[in-house]
Each structure stands twice: as structure tokens, then as C-alpha cells.
Amino acid sequence: MSQCHVCSGDRFREEVTSEIFRIGDRLLLVEDIPVMVCDRCGEEVFDRDTMERVRVLLHGNARPIRTVEVGVFSF
């Protein structure tokens, strides 16, 4: 990563994050995703290989490690 596409910062740190994805009518949580975070603005950037692994995980035959209940509100 050379430069942040949001703020043009050039310093990043490695972290892990969690993201919720909507696939049809299902919400799926993926935890512990490696991400690069801009030190200047906090923008999270996923590399191509990581996103491909997430795609395969969500659309493949993987089984979730646990199930959680999600509250739904209408605004």
C-alpha cells in the first residue's frame, strides 16, 4: 500500500476487523479479517487476496463456527 485513496496518507498499520455481509436475505459476519488501516484518517483497505478469500468463504461450502442473533430495527 503506497497511498490512502481517501486522504493521501502514506502510513498504514496492520489490524484485524469484522464485517457483516448481506447475501440475499441473510446477514453473515466474518471476523478476524486482516486489514491495512491508514494512520492519518483510519480508512480500512482490504487487499485483493483477502477479499477473494472472504468471497469463497461466503459463497462456498464453509460452515459458520457459531450463530448469533441480530436485532433488526426500521428507521
Image (cartoon, rainbow, N blue to C red):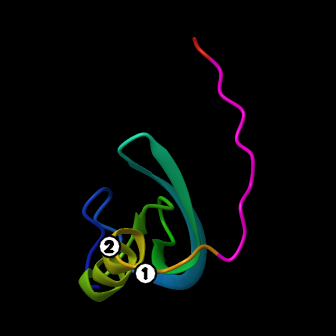
Closer to the camera in the image, 70 or 61: 61
Seen at 52% across and 48% down, the residue is 27
Look at the picture and state if 33 lies above or below 6.
below
Q: Quadrant of the N terminus?
A: bottom left
Q: Secondary structure at mark 2?
A: helix
Q: Position of residue 52 (x, y in %)?
A: 28, 80
Q: Quadrant of residue 32?
A: bottom right
Mark 2 vs mark 1, CA separation in Å: 27 Å
Q: Position of residue 5 (x, y in %)?
A: 24, 63
Could you tell me which residue is drawn at 43 percent across and 39 percent down? Answer: 25
Where is 3 relative to 70, above or below? below
Q: Is residue 54 magenta?
A: no
In the drawing, does residue 38 fall left or right of residue 5? right
Q: Nearer the viewer, residue 22 or 63?
A: 63
Q: Residues within 10 Å of mark 2 (few under 14, many from 20)?
A: few
- Identified by mark 2, the residue type is Arg
* Three-letter amino acid code at the position of disc 1: Arg
Check the image and report above or below for 25 versus 9. Answer: above
The mark found on residue 11 in the picture is 1
Predominant SS of the magenta segment: loop
Q: Which residues are magenta?
A: 65-73
Q: Pointer 2: what residue?
A: 55
Q: Is residue 68 magenta?
A: yes
Q: Which mark is residue 24?
A: none
Q: Nearer the viewer, residue 14 or 11?
A: 14
